[in-house]
């Protein structure tokens, strides 16, 4: 079962994407160093907000645990890896 996505995380992700878009738009023109610095600061701030949220939000932490467990469950253990080696087929 997958935990539903967190609405606050979606909002913060949108803000981060918008900050990247803003920096790209500034860089596409003849970039003013002050505007570029402001755009970079906006990206850093959005990253900080997103990271802080993910650390504090029970819904996001539960989702990350679930994803980690699913990815761990899909990996074969070392004893199973021998079953998939083609060079051992006679
Ligand atoms: Zn969250």
Image: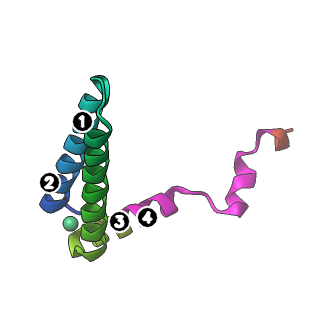
Q: Disc 1 marks which residue?
A: 21
Q: What whole-number distance in Å separates the C-alpha atoms at marks 3 and 2? A: 18 Å
Q: Disc 2 marks which residue?
A: 11
The quarter of the image holding the C terminus is top right
Q: What whole-number distance in Å separates the C-alpha atoms at marks 4 and 1? A: 30 Å
Q: Position of residue 5 (x, y in %)?
A: 20, 58
Q: What whole-number distance in Å separates the C-alpha atoms at marks 3 and 1? A: 27 Å
> Magenta residues?
66-86
Numbered circle sitting on residue 68? 4
Q: Name the front one of labels 3 and 1.
A: 1
Ligand 1 is found in which quarter of the picture?
A: bottom left
Q: Which element is circle 3 on?
A: helix
Judged from this view, the residue extending furthest toward the right is: 90
For residue 41: magenta? Answer: no
Q: Quadrant of residue 20 in the image?
A: top left
Earlier along the polypeptide chain: callout 1 or callout 2?
Answer: 2
Q: Which element is circle 4 on?
A: helix
């Amino acid at each position: 079962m997958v935990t539903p996505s967190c609405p606050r995380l979606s909002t913060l992700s949108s803000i981060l994407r918008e900050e990247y878009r803003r920096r790209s738009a500034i860089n596409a023109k003849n970039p003013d160093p002050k505007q570029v610095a402001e755009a970079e600061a906006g990206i850093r701030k959005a990253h900080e907000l997103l990271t802080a949220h993910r650390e504090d939000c029970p819904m996001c932490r539960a989702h990350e645990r679930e994803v980690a467990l699913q990815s761990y469950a899909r990996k074969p253990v070392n004893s199973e890896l021998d079953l998939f080696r083609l060079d051992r087929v006679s």
